[in-house]
Image (cartoon, rainbow, N blue to C red):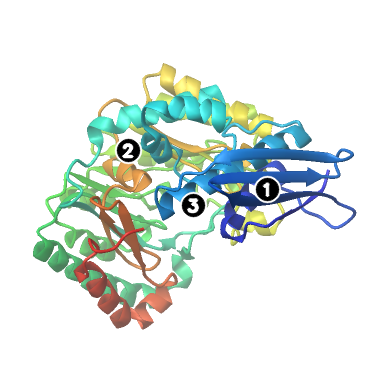
Amino acid sequence: MLLKFTHNQPNFDSDLQELFRAFYPSISAGDENYIDLNAAVERGELKVVITSDVFDKFKKVYTFEVDSSSEMAYKRSVKRHLKVALYRCLSFLSNTNLPYGCLTGIRPTKYFAELGVNAKEIFEKEFSVHGDKVKLVQSCVVNQIPYKNTKPETVVDVFVNIPFCPSRCAYCSFVSTVIGKQQAVVGPYIDCLKREISQIKKIIKDKKYSVRAVYVGGGTPTSLKIGELKAVLACLKFGQKEFTVEAGRPDTITKETVKIMKRAKVTRISVNPQSFNQKTLDKIGRTHKVEDVINAYGLVRKKFDVNMDLIAMLPGETFDDFKYSVDKAIELAPENITVHTLCLKNGSKLKEEGYFNQNFEEAKKMVDYAMYTLTAKGYQPYYMYRQKYMAGNLENVGYSKPKKYCLYNIDVMEEDTSVLACGAGAISKKFSPRINLIERQANCKEPADYVKRFEEMLSKQKEFWEKDSENKSD
């Protein structure tokens, strides 16, 4: 069925449209039925009227009490109730229940924690989140408590972006370029990056910050030449407890790479198979063999804590294919296994080719198998996030062996730690805990633009960290 959705709430258009697309992801030309949402607040009460021609004279009216204690509380309250009303109607009209109910945000764990002691009841009864998903969210919230940043005023993280890869994966929408085609910009990029790192070192010293986690991401940082990688890692000495480098492409991991990372005191890396099925790797543009993953893992195991990424709903994969990958990852026993649900974004080859990944039942079967099998083997869910256009409207979850959690992942997902970020596409985040305010400063996305406009970005970054946020409010 095709539905045309209209509403009179422009301030909440993104949230309402995202919820609508979760039920009706396909849009095509032709005759359409309609659903219309009309809402207004009068005397502290939100009245939502939803009409549709899917059924003759269909009309639903909802009323909610609005929290007017502050402007922020008012906006959140209105958005929350609009989504609850729309979800209930869409669920009825489509005869479908979504695993996360009316939740559309990236960080369900953060929302759960903010709701406090009534979170479980609100998630289940008001938001219509399935019981197994409520349990998963609650487990992540509880498991990460001992690892949360307890001094957000002074303890920060550092992120460094290396947006280069050996090849571009079909599902990738990041600003990441094939390094073989960008050699002319790599050298200048590394020179600028080292200067930006020097500036944040001075900011950290002047602000008397301490760094608990450094994360070098991408792209694939280990796709750099040995000398370039060594030069970047040598700059990242902050006395941090955790030092992560994404080495996700196994074809970039060599004995020399391992030696350099070990000398730089890297503590955690990734070796990402995505799938242990060769036909899938070929289809998604991974230019390595399954054996390369296993060989690379052999080089790094017991030298670093290792994360492996797997993706559910890759093109052409059946449940048995995905099950094989999960079982194989568990057999190798890395410290962390992150299970992603395929998300198709603009800019990815799969999206451009029209690949459709919204098989709810197949996606759910895959991620459920991963959850039950990993937890049965002693892995604990400790962070999660959701994205638009995910298969089955599901989630990404990081599972870890006890006491092997990635601090940076927790900090970023829960948004309770400032992040000083360097490189193209990097976004610095300043968290002011007293007023619960997050401010952002983004660098240029493209590596060439980053080099060209580098002085401008340095200046903006310096100004961003020098300005006072305590006199602001949301």
The answer to whether residue 284 of the structure is visible from this angle is no
User: Between residues 424 and 140, which one lies in front from this camera angle?
Assistant: 140
Q: What residue type is labelled 2?
A: Val
Residue 66, position as x, y percentages in the image:
51, 44
| Residue reaching furthest to the front | 43
Q: Mark 2 and mark 1 in contact (Cβ < 8 Å)?
A: no
Mark 1–mark 3 distance (CA, rounded to whole Å): 22 Å
Residue under label 2, please give it: 306
Which mark, residue 21? Answer: 1
Q: What residue type is labelled 1?
A: Arg
Give SS at disc 3: helix
455 w.r.t. 334: above or below: below
Residue under label 3, please give it: 75
74 left or right of 303?
right
Q: From the image, state whether disc 1 or disc 2 is nearer to you.
A: 1
User: Between residues 405 and 280, which one lies in front from this camera angle?
Assistant: 405
Residue at x-position 49% and y-position 20%: 372
Residue at x-position 19% and y-position 58%: 236
